[in-house]
Amino acid sequence: MMTNLFSVFDPSANFNLSLNWLSSIIFMFLMIPSFWMIVNKHTTIINKIFMTLHMEFKMLLGPSSNMGSTVLFITLLMFIMLNNFLGLFPYIFTSTSHITLTLTLALPFWMGFMLYGWINLTNHMFAHLVPQSTPSALMPFMVLIESISNIIRPLTLSVRLMANMVAGHLLMTLLGNQTAIASNFILMSLIITQILLLTLESAVALIQSYVFAVLTTLYSSEITSH
């Protein structure tokens, strides 16, 4: 039963080709050039959203951030959000429910921040391992705790996103499997519950992409703010 239950998250496809991973870039085919070249209400709204995100990420990064660095985090947010929303449509593979994708996104960012910090700002990185006003007796333990905290950051980032996407989809699958044997009253209750759950999943898709991008931005600001 568990194999059938989790088969909706199976990334395999026919002909030994994982073609369903193409859902991660399917939004690129929807970006019609005329949509971006011709100024209309939609592009105006999107530009306002991008400017709002730009100001927020710029504030998180601090005054010492490089110009254009917010574009990277806005792109990350939009990529995750679009993939989260696409996974809510029927028969579309949810790539963000796999740690294969989420860890692929989190690990390079973390590696880049760590390499940049330890190569260029070594003293600053050592200072981060011991918080201010730490008693001398606790310093070795704080160094160990902070080191473990830094090491597991990409794992916590990726597992948080993956677990939230899997949990909602799994619950919707469980409720959907009960419709075939349900009575009329229970069927109506299941439909209402599914609609409410779909609304909740839409909010989760937006929130989790925002959380992933903001946490990545904060990890970057810890390195650059000195």
Image (spheres, rainbow, N blue to C red):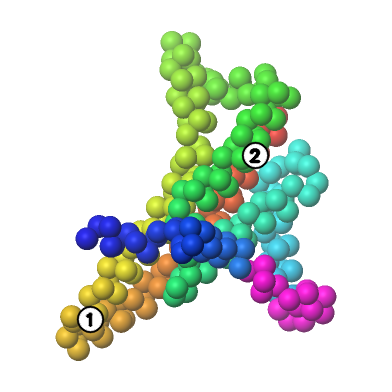
Tell me where residue 65 sits by quadrant.
top right
With respect to residue 122, does 3 lie above or below? Answer: below
| Labelled disc at residue 220 | 2
Side (left or right) of 38 relative to 10: right
What is the secondary structure assignment of the residue under circle 1? helix
Side (left or right) of 61 relative to 128: right
**Which residue occupies 68% across, 20% down?**
122
Amino acid under label 2? Ser
**Which residue occupies 30% across, 81% down?**
191
Q: Is residue 205 visible?
A: no
- Please provide the residue range marked out in magenta: 27-42
| Residue 211 horizontal/vertical position (percent) | 53, 52
In this view of the protein, which residue sits in the foreground, 147 or 24?
A: 24
With respect to residue 170, does 226 lie above or below? Answer: above
| Labelled disc at residue 180 | 1
In this view of the protein, which residue sits in the foreground, 177 or 153?
A: 177
